[in-house]
């Protein structure tokens, strides 16, 4: 299991910082893990699964 920082999340998904946090607020994106008072990271596998779901949903439209 690997934790990745926001920059890596943005690179993987193509989303902007504001969009990542907007989607989190709307329960449409994996929530980060709090590592410290001002530090968070995401579980890489959860981000990869979110991307897979987006890819899979293409065929159902």
Image (spheres, rainbow, N blue to C red):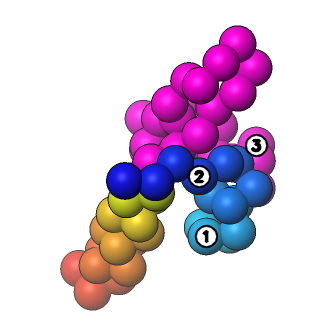
Tell me if mark 1 has few (under 14), some (14-19) or many (20+) residues whose alpha carbon lies within 10 angstroms of its own.
Answer: few
Distance of label 2 from label 1 (alpha carbons): 10 Å
Residue at the extreme top: 37
Q: Residue at x 38, y 79 (%)?
A: 55
Give yes or no for contact between labels 2 and 1 (Cβ–Cβ under 8 Å).
yes
What residue is shown at x 37% (from left), y 53% (from top)? 1
Comes first in the chain, label 2 or label 3: 2
What residue sits right under mark 3 in the picture?
18
Q: Nearer the viewer, residue 60 or 51?
A: 51
- Badge 2 marks a residue whose secondary structure is strand
Q: Nearer the viewer, residue 7 or 55?
A: 7
Residue 4: mark = 2
Tell me residue 18's x, y (percent).
76, 43
- Judged by depth in the image, the label closer to the viewer, 3 or 1, is 1
Q: Nearer the viewer, mark 2 or mark 1?
A: 2
Q: Residues within 10 Å of mark 2 (few under 14, many from 20)?
A: some
Tag 2 and tag 3, C-beta contact below 8 Å? no
Q: Earlier in the sequence, mark 3 or mark 1?
A: 1
Span colored in magenta: 16-43
Q: Which residue is mark 1?
A: 12
Q: CA separation, marks 2 and 3?
A: 17 Å
Which quadrant would residue 7 be assigned to in this image? bottom right
Position of 54 compared to 24: left or right? left
Q: Residue at x 75, y 20 (%)?
A: 38
Q: Position of residue 22 (x, y in %)?
A: 63, 38
| Whether residue 10 is visible | yes
Question: Where's the C terminus, which quadrant?
Answer: bottom left
Q: Is residue 1 left or right of residue 38?
A: left
């Amino acid at each position: 299991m690997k934790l990745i920082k926001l920059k890596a999340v943005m690179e993987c998904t193509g989303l902007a910082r504001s969009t990542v946090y907007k989607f989190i607020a709307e329960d449409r994106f994996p929530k980060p893990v709090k590592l410290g008072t001002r530090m968070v990271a995401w579980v890489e596998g959860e981000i990869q699964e979110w991307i897979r779901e987006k890819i899979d949903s293409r065929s159902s439209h």
